[in-house]
Structure formats: structure tokens, C-alpha cells
Amino acid sequence: MGTVILAIDQGTTGSTVALMDTSGVVIASASHEFPQLFPQPGWVEHDPESIWQSVLKGVDKVFNESAVSPADVITIGITNQRETAILWDRETGEALHNAIVWQCRRTTDVCQQLKEAGCESMVRERAGLVLDPYFSASKYRWLIDHAEVTEGDIDSGRVLAGTVDSYLLWRLTGGAVHATDVSNAARTSLMNLETLAWDSSLCDLFGVPMRILPTIMPSSTRFGVTGSVPGLPDGIPVSGIAGDQQAALFGQACFDAGDAKCTFGTGSFILMNTGELPVSSDSGLLTTVAWQLDGSRPSYALEGGAFVCGAAVQWLRDQLGIINAAHEIEALAASVPDAGGVEFVPALTGLGAPHWDPDARGLLSGLTRGSGRGEIARATLDAMALQNADILKVMERESGQSMQSLRVDGGASANNLLMQLQANYLDREIVRPELIETTVAGACFLAGLAEGVWSGLDDIRAAWRVDRKFDVDLDAEDRKLRFASWNAAIAKTRYNAAS
């Protein structure tokens, strides 16, 4: 038997290939970026071949720079940027158009027309998602309309559609397998959350032929085996697939209802495990499949996100010049006891959950002659923690689950002051794991589980290890006053937008 699991973490700007040993330790990784394409304002594309080549480069490098051989690989797990849509030719393997990336807004008008036609409630009820160009369905329709695809091509089975996981699986298996997992299918607006199958009403609504879509499978199962992949022997099973945020939830061992994780990236992505039944939201949170293990019922999650999290620190660095490097913000914010009445609402691209106000604008308020760089830095960290607390409190209310602690990952989770502020404002313990590459961990755990590397979830819990815990250090009255000031500042962002 081999000694390592290979993970492909295919992200928006690059691909990481990593190796995890059977004790749950990542022993090597290699990353490669690929070009971002912006053919028009608001449009974002990727060349699927560039994505695949970035993966192959990672495979080559990770073995060249480690003592591990490709023959040592037990299984492969995939985690990926979600919602990005690809159309390709089954016979030639060539993409029929550049991939339309999740960030792309080209189908905004289509989604708006469907909203005006009263279709959003049906999409919400069946798919758990809002009507938005963020999701894959309208992207697939655009690709069909603009890639010179004929009805004959579709009827013959020559045209294949899929998210990035499906495309990578197809390439890894030498074109033998066209499949996806439930967590990625749940992000298309085409899968029924309860049946876990493509929904004919949703496919008809968006004009996507069901026959071009991949087979939906559990997240942890043997999808297929490698064939004709440069740098890898044939016959390695591909046994785990999950969208990046669901993979992070699994990688954080959030296996029970009420378990939650927050990924601190450019934005913040928050998922809470809601158990075996989907929980609908009245506050704009998304209902999604977290994962499904082979032979088991699926686990569901509520998802919410703040558009600007780490990007607020980048804004201080690049636009205001308050810091020279992102890591400097912790020491600068710690140089003052508090924000001194300064509020920064980072609505630089509108407000996400639970406010959902695309017209809101960023706000820096409460400035006095005594306000300086330290107070603005502290207000920025406050905002990053406060907006997450807003989302998580809504999740607790709507799920009926009381969270015991919040598990954190992503680059900004290394900021100890931010983690302490998050504990104080959320009024929950914050837990940071040793392994913060939780998307990689989730892909490896899902694949290894299917192949018997771990016998069950308890084994994975044992492999998940804590780096540090942050306990609450703020009394209830001070927390109440802090939120009153924050909420007043948020209200002003809406006033500014309206005026």
C-alpha cells in the first residue's frame, strides 16, 4: 500500500498540489498560478487548459522536491473553486470556450429577468440558492449560446458541461469519467437539495440540457482511476471531491450539527453544519450540501460570507498607505487599547450576508484629532470580526443550533489579535488548527476515508490537531455597546448609498 494521499486544490488564481501522510500531516506542496482573463468589464474567464497545466506542473514539482514517489500515492482528492463553468468536447477533449469564473457578472441581466418573472422562490426552494450570476446555471446557458454548440452536438453526447472538479476528474481519468460530487452540484442552481439529483424544472428554467451534465456522486467514493496523466501511474483511484469551502468544513472536522468554520481570506467564508436536513434561510444565507459519504445521508450547511475581509487590510496597504505589508496590521492595531470610537465598515463592494445591500458603500467614521493609524488599524480588525459575528448569530438562530466554538483557517487566522477580537464579539471560543490548509486537508480526508486510510470520522478527529484556542475576554455589557456602535455605522453606509 502507498504512503501518501495527493490533493489537488484548484483555486481561482492558481493550483496547489499537496501530499499528506496517513497521520494527517502535509509533507509537501507546490503551487502554480495561471492567467486571469478579463475580456470585458465585469467578465472573468480562465483557459481550462491553463488550469490543467498548472495542476500538472504542481504534480511534477511536488514529487521532484520531496522524497516521495508517484508510486507511493494511495488515492487522489480534489477540491476546487466553486461555480466556475466549463463546456468541452467529449471527442477531442478541447474546451469549447474559456471557463466562466464564479466572479463573472455577465449573466446579471438573465438572472434579473428571472427574478422579475417571479422565479426566485422556486430556485430558493429547490436549490437553496438565490438567483444570482454567481452560480453555474446561467453560465452554462451562456456557454451553450455562445460556443457554437448545435442541438446535434448536444443530442449526440459530444458536449460535456461541468464545474472545475468535473473537468479535472475527466482529465485525470483519461476521459473515462464525467462526474461531480454533491457539494459542487449544489452550487449550480440545478440540483435539487432533497433528491440530490438534477432537477428537471431548474434545468428547464435555465435552458440547460440535463444530458450534458455530469453524474452526481457522493463526496467520498471511488470516482474512477487515473489514466494517461503525465507524471502519475495509471490506476490511482480518485476518491474524494468537494468544493473548496465544504472541503474546509470537512478538513476542520466539523462533523456535527452546530459545528462551524470561518475561512479568513480576501472575503470571509462561513459555513455551519446543520445536520442531515437542509435548513432554509429568511436572511439571505445559502443552504447547501456540505458533503456526502459513501452509503450515508448527506450533511447540509448554511453558508454566509462577507465580501471584504482580508481585502480591507490590502486596502489600507495599497490605497491609504497606512501599512507597508499586510502582517504589520496586528502590531499597529495592538499599539492602541481600542479603536477610540473609530468605525470602519468595509462595504467596499457592498454588504453581503446578512444585510445584502449591493449599494452600500464603505464608511470610516468617528474620527477626531486624536485618531491615528493605530485606531484605523484597530477599527479594521474590529470590522472583520464584527461582520462575521453578525453572520454567525443569524446562522445560530435559523439553524436552531448553538455553536460551542468556531474553527478558523485562512491567512488572517494567524493574526492573534484578530482571533481574540473574534472570540470577544462572537462570545464563543475560537479554535485554530495546526494545519491551516484546511481545503487540502478536507480533500485528503474525503479521499482517504473512501480508500480505508481512516476507518471513520473518529479517526479523522484524532488526526485534526489544535494549535491555539482563544477564550472570550469581554463582558456582556461592553459587547452590547460595541455592537450598538457597529450597527449605527452600518446604517450610515445605507444612508450614504441612498443619498
Image: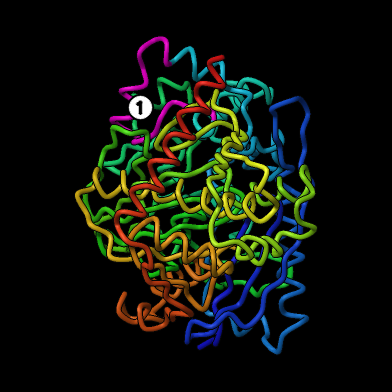
Q: Position of residue 212 (x, y in %)?
A: 50, 35
| Residue type at numbered disc 1 | Val
* Residue pictured at 42% horizontal, 75% vertical: 469
Q: Is residue 478 above or below residue 159?
A: below
Which residue does the numbered mark 1 point to in the structure image?
123
Residue 409 appears in the rendering: yes
Residue positioned most to the left: 400
Q: How is the image coloured?
A: rainbow
Front residue of 153/320: it is: 320
Circle 1 residues within 10 Å: few <14, some 14–19, many ≥20 = many
Q: Position of residue 286 (x, y in %)?
A: 38, 39
Reply yes or no: does residue 302 show up in magenta: no
* Residue pictured at 64% horizontal, 65% vertical: 335
The image quadrant of residue 366 is: top right
* Residue pictured at 77% horizontal, 44% vertical: 320
Residue positioned most to the top: 117
Q: Is residue 391 above or below residue 147?
A: below
Q: Position of residue 399 (x, y in %)?
A: 23, 47
Front residue of 407/181: it is: 407
Q: Position of residue 367 (x, y in %)?
A: 62, 40
Q: Is residue 62 toward the left or the right of residue 488 in the image?
A: right
The image quadrant of residue 126 is: top left
Q: Secondary structure at mark 1?
A: helix
Front residue of 412/453: it is: 412
The image quadrant of residue 364 is: top right
Residue positioned most to the front: 369
Magenta region, residue range: 115-133
Residue 154 appears in the rendering: no
